[in-house]
Amino acid sequence: MALDAHPLNSLGFAKPPSETRVVVAMSGGVDSSVVAAQLAEEGYDVVGVTLQLYDHGAALAKKGACCAGLDIHDARRVAEEMGFPHYVLDYENTFKEAVIDEFADSYLAGATPVPCIRCNERVKFKDLLETARDLDADCMATGHYIQRKMGAAGAELHCAADANRDQSYFLFSTTPEQLNYLRFPLGHLPSKDDTRALAARYGLSVADKPDSQDICFVPNGNYASVIEKLRPGAAEPGEIVDVDGNVLARHEGVIHYTIGQRRGLGIGGLDTPLYVVKLDVNTRQVIVGPKEMLATRTIPVREINWLGDGAFTDLSERHVSVKVRSTRPPREAIIRPISATEAEVELLTPEEGVSPGQACVFYETGGTRILGGGWIWRGY
């Protein structure tokens, strides 16, 4: 290294923090607020940006959401407290077209979508990231619990140090190019308590703010009511049938059910508990069967984003671990590529309740690296 070269700062740039501009994506919550405050304290040229994503009446005063009325106010207040500029961008139309509409249409097609992944992929890490570049920022930082580490071939995505807070399932579609530009300052922290302790240390007004829980645009977790508003007539009644086609009950709309559901079917009194094993949108039927029918070994996956070394199709099969739901631990599997963006995933141990519309995320077996993932796309 030349004598006059500057050592790398904490964001990985060979210049002083004061000459390093970083856009912080601020949701108004404690995590992104701590990231902004920490970088401001370290002397970085911080610019806070909050996206207004939706503005329906129930959301404005709803606690536990993000990116609407109260949260925009909280983000602005943190920026004022720490003395850096803050901007609010109206992305309501983009968010509706890229996230909310697909969420509704996926449910109507009998899938179980994960809109938080699409929001990261199509809004935060696409449009907002481009805005950061337009602001001449060197990088963009977020409050996600995930780690970015430098490997032999460049930036790698790794699980958060705190497994209970890890958000890797929701960030598998981050591209290598995006990963070069992104920073995740909280990923190494041992627990959320450490984040709140930092918020208290910085004297932030959001230090005790509750975490967001539900999908931001779904008040009280009532998906069906949101879909009925977006797609009038969506909740058409139909039949609950067993796998032999016998009618067991009536229902008020396929959108009220998900694969693997047992409760709320209205078919009590049977010797064997029954679960939703399939949703047939065309016939408006909810098909139920015994628990063993939920077990799936082979999963078709498409729209694959590959973050591993080499091209995805370099090998005829890869031994990895996969997650088919955000709340489940990774399970050993074999990926067999069909093309650069499609594959068949074979689970070594069958999983229950695998549903189209969910993500299948690939992990390094026995390690922390995220190798990418894709979308589960049809019934079995």
Image (spheres, rainbow, N blue to C red):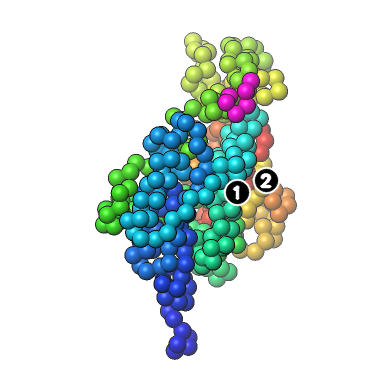
Using the image as rendered, state which of residue 80 and residue 204 is in the foreground.
80
Identified at 35% across, 67% down, the residue is 42
Asked whether residue 352 is in view, the answer is yes
**The stretch drawn in magenta includes residue 229:** yes
Q: Amino acid at mark 1?
A: Arg
Under tag 2, what secondary structure? strand
Q: Which mark, residue 302?
A: 2
Q: Residues within 10 Å of mark 1 (few under 14, many from 20)?
A: some
Q: Which residue is mark 1?
A: 122
Q: Which mark, residue 48?
A: none
Identified at 47% across, 31% down, the residue is 57
Q: Amino acid at mark 2?
A: Arg
Asked whether residue 197 is in view, the answer is no
Q: Position of residue 184 (x, y in %)?
A: 45, 59
Identified at 33% across, 43% down, the residue is 209
Magenta stretch: give its range.
228-233
In the displayed structure, does residue 34 sit left or right of residue 123? left
Above/below status of 249 relative to 60: above
Q: Position of residue 308 (x, y in %)?
A: 59, 60
Under tag 1, what secondary structure? helix
Using the image as rendered, state which of residue 227 and residue 277 is in the foreground.
227
